[in-house]
Amino acid sequence: MEARRSLATNLANEAEAYGYTLSIWGAGALLIDAYGVPALGGAMAYVLGALVGFAALAGVAFRGFLETADVEGSDSALVASTVHAVSTVGSLSATAVIVNVPGLPRLLTFALVGFAVTVAYNLLLLAEQLFARALRRL
């Protein structure tokens, strides 16, 4: 698997998930409006809920976590690797580091978070995929 091609595939796949991105972000905005800005625990709880929901759907759709995700001629990674816990929690952790840097201007913080989440998520997603493929070869 060529890393650049896999990254390109990831980016193309994410483009199709644009509606989900808007939904999850919009839901977060509504939570902030209703309850105020959450601390790290609240943000992690929000992400954990999303991961558990996705894992539940993936488990049902693929009839288990150790089955192969062979959909429309995909590369058949392990279903468990589609939950993307490492890339999601890792990118959220990068955000936590950035927002806790003292004295960063607000707009710069928002820009850095947008950048870091995008880059960290995609690179960690690539690492998850490589790890899942290595596990399948074992």
Image: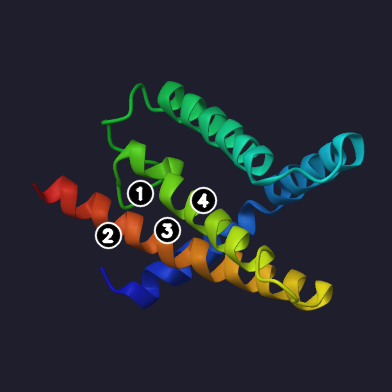
Nearer-the-camera pick, 128 or 66: 128
From the image, tell me which residue sits under label 3. 125
Work out whether mark 1 precedes mark 2 in sequence or the reverse, and give the earlier one: 1
User: Would you say 38 lies left or right of 92 here?
Assistant: right
Three-letter residue code for mark 3: Leu
Residue displayed at 76% across by 50% down:
22
From the image, tell me which residue sits under label 4. 88
Q: Residues within 10 Å of mark 2 (few under 14, many from 20)?
A: some
Indicate whether 127 appears above or below 37: below
Label 3 to label 4, Cα distance in Å?
A: 8 Å
Image position, residue 4 (x, y; %) = 38, 77
Label 2 to label 3, Cα distance in Å?
A: 9 Å
Label 2 to label 4, Cα distance in Å?
A: 16 Å
- Residue furthest to the right: 33
Q: Residues within 10 Å of mark 3 (few under 14, many from 20)?
A: many
- Secondary structure under badge 1? loop
User: Would you say 43 lies left or right of 27 here?
Assistant: left
